[in-house]
Image (cartoon, coloured by chain):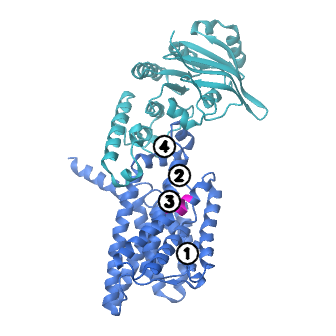
Amino acid sequence: MSGELLWWLNLLVGVGIFTLLATSLNLINGHAGMFHLGHHGFWALGAYATAWWTIRLDGELSGPVLYGTSLLLSTGVAAVGGLAVGLPCLRLRGDYLAIATLAFGEVVRILIQNSDKGFLGGSQGVRLPRVFGEFEGEAAKLEFRALSLALVATLCVLAIWAISNFIRSGHGRRLLAVAQDETAAGLMGIDPTRPRVLAFVIGAAVAGLAGGVHAHFEGSLAPQEFEFMQTVKMFLIVVLGGMGSLSGCVVGAFLVVGTERLLARAGGAIADWWQVIFPMVLAIMIVVRPQGIFGRRELSDWFRALRRRRAAP
Amino acid sequence: MSESLFSCRELTKQYGGLTAVRNVGIEIRKGELVGLIGPNGAGKTTCFNLITGADEPSAGRIRFCGSDVTNTRDFRMARLGVARTFQNIRLWREMNVLDNVRAVCRGSSQYGLLAAFLRLPRFRRGEREATNEARSLLKLLGLDGKEAELAGDLPYGDQRRLEIARALALRPRLLLLDEPAAGMNPSEKSDLMRTIQAIRAEFDLTILLIDHDMKFVMGICERIYVLDHGEEIAQGSPEEIRRNPKVIEAYLGEQA
């Protein structure tokens, strides 16, 4: 029974982490309209920043402080990474931007893979000290996963709230304007580079945060995890939910991560079928409903419409 | 005679071997409503692109408000006070009507990133200001009640008016209208004429407009420049232009 519960908690934390990754990818690809394929690189930067910090300062800071500061560091490191990628790539469009960002993601993975064993663990990976103490027995494991779920859910709510505030502000409007018609935006006094760089930095920062959460939750990291297929998965979530819809990301994360984990649990030959199913779903989706489940709409639009209908006699 | 707001001299633009605009000189005084006409391909829109900084001139100087602004980038020109509308409407089609205007309003750039993330008071103040300004502009152009519709879903005439509202949100000193009456029927055209006169008075605007419809241009402009094959062939009052043999030839030549 408790094994079952552990599995579900595990799944939900995974959904939470991928919700963070997909919403941040969506900001860059969906809202800003930039074809970015290196999100796994930002994720890896965040995860390894947390690992590095936690290993160095284990025992010197208390658990919650270590957890909090490591997530801040992850967010910051990934944001700097976003700036470093965003600035030189701004002149690139479409396919060229996709190639450059994809290369970035792969470079991050390969650098970590070839890093010094004492620095980031190299190809062997690293183990993180457990900031909330080592847990023995089912009950302690359950407690840790429930706590992780509460944390990741809180972070998801905060991140989605902040991103949706950003999009519905002047900054967000200028971003959408540049994405939809750059020429018109320029002639209306909007500097087209600023919103683009901003989207890159914010998107990278949130992916870094997801990396930090992931590192603490898993307790160990291996560079092979942060492969291109992870970005494909995030991409599928975004396309399934709807480019430019935050609600779509949450629903998409449930569908994609849920399917993957359920197939893995079924085990045997079926376990790897997600690698066949996902690209097929992606292809079908693009043919049948390219705008995704939600299009650019949000759940809140629907609630508002419902309330209006109820208010009307 | 009031002071000069805008002038360009010997403005030339070459695309490879093709000269789209050659030695064009335009001077506009504060408060004037000036027309720029000419047959298709005469270089009118190219002139607009050079004036607004969307394109760099190959030669010539541009002055605005007493300073040299040649080779100033488009968004800087816009901030200096040069706004425009487009011949082929360029709204942000996936954004709603209100946001198309609010994206340009000053209020929406008066707060930082943190204020936006956390909806701080500065954000609310800036947004309130932007929303009020956008609403009053929409009302002025008869678009109130449509603010939640997507710009791309609006009927053609409304899209043209929304472009004007968006340009006014820049609080420009010089407004460039690129074929504002294109595709409109006579009654819509006379509405538009009234609207242009109204915004001109209200915002103390100087306007340069391009149009094909001679009746429309003659009816509204105080002074007219005529371009043909990238060169300025005439300028003067509507009466002078109507009688100018070169202009008659350019237009009749096109039809023949």
> Where is residue B1 drawn, in percent x and y?
51, 9
At 62% from the left edge and 53% from the top edge, which residue is drawn?
A: A93
Q: Callout 1: few (<14), some (14-19), or many (20+) C-alpha neighbours within 10 Å? A: many
Type of amino acid at the residue the image marks with label 4: Arg
Q: Callout 3: few (<14), some (14-19), or many (20+) C-alpha neighbours within 10 Å? A: some
Residues at marks 3 and 2, CA–CA distance in whole angstroms: 27 Å
Type of amino acid at the residue the image marks with label 3: Arg
Q: Earlier in the sequence, mark 3 or mark 1?
A: 1
Instruction: In the displayed orientation, state which residue is furthest to the bottom.
Output: A137
Q: Colour of chain A?
A: blue
Q: Quadrant of residue B28?
A: top right
Q: Colour of chain B?
A: cyan
Residues at marks 2 and 4, CA–CA distance in whole angstroms: 19 Å
Q: Which residue is mark 3?
A: A289
Q: Earlier in the sequence, mark 1 or mark 2?
A: 2
Q: Which residue is mark 1?
A: A226
Report the chain holding disc 1: A
> Where is residue B220 drawn, in percent x and y?
50, 15
Residue interval drawn in magenta: A79-83
Q: Secondary structure at mark 3?
A: loop
Q: Secondary structure at mark 4?
A: loop
Instruction: In the displayed orientation, state which residue is furthest to the left.
Output: A313
| Membership of B66 in magenta stretch | no
> Where is residue A164 drawn, in percent x and y?
39, 55
